[in-house]
Image (cartoon, grey):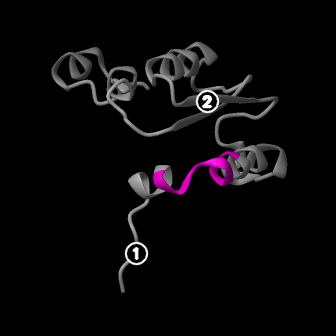
Amino acid sequence: MGFPRWVIRIVPNVWDTVHLAGELEVAVLVVHSDVDDLFAMSMAKRLVEACGARRRLIVVSGLLHNAPIFTPTAMYWQPIANWVQQRPSEDLTEVLPAVRG
C-alpha cells in the first residue's frame, strides 16, 4: 500500500483477515473480480477457505476494484442481493441487530 518498510515492522497487522475470518460464526460472502487491480484473486480464495463451512465466493468478470461503487451494475449487485435473500433470518439477525427508535 506504499508504506515505508519501517512502519510495516512496528504497526500491528490489522489486515490479517484470513486469521480473523476463521473465527467467524456467521455466513460469509466474498465477492471478487477476476481483474481486481488492488487485490489478487488468490487473496479472496484464501479468505473463503478460512471461513469454514458457511461461506461463498462470487467471482465477477471485468470489474476493477472500485467499479461496483462508482459505476454500480446489476451484474455485480444482483448476486449479492440474491445471497442475502436466501439467508435464513437467524443468520441476518446475528449480523444486523434490530434498529431501535
Q: Determine the residue positioned at 70% across, 52% down.
A: 81
> Circles 1 and 2: CB distance less than 8 Å?
no
Q: Quadrant of residue 60?
A: top right
Hey, which residue is sitting farthest left in the picture? Answer: 10
Hey, which residue is sitting farthest bottom in the picture? Answer: 101
Q: Which mark is residue 99?
A: 1
Residue 88 forms part of the magenta stretch = yes
Q: Which residue is mark 2?
A: 56
- Residue 67 image point, x, y percent: 72, 43
Residue 29 forms part of the magenta stretch = no
Residue 19 as seen in the image, left or right of residue 36: left
- Residue 62 image point, x, y percent: 81, 30
Q: Earlier in the sequence, mark 1 or mark 2?
A: 2
Relative to 100, is 65 above or below?
Answer: above
Q: Separation of disc 1 and disc 2 at Cα? A: 27 Å
For badge 2, the amino acid type reads Arg
Q: Which mark is residue 87?
A: none
- Residue 33 image point, x, y percent: 71, 29
For badge 1, the amino acid type reads Val
Q: Determine the residue positioned at 37% across, 36% down.
A: 25
Q: Determine the residue positioned at 67% across, 27% down.
A: 36
Label 1 sits on a secondary structure element that is: loop
Label 2 sits on a secondary structure element that is: strand
Residue 95 as seen in the image, left or right of residue 29: left
- Circle 1 Cα neighbour tier, 10 Å, few/some/many (<14 / 14–19 / ≥20): few
In the rendered view of the protein, which quadrant contains the N terminus?
top left
Q: Quadrant of residue 41?
A: top right
- Circle 2 Cα neighbour tier, 10 Å, few/some/many (<14 / 14–19 / ≥20): some
Using the image as rendered, state which of residue 19 and residue 64 is in the foreground: 19
Using the image as rendered, state which of residue 84 and residue 66 is in the foreground: 84
What's the magenta region?
83-90
Using the image as rendered, state which of residue 8 and residue 26 is in the foreground: 26
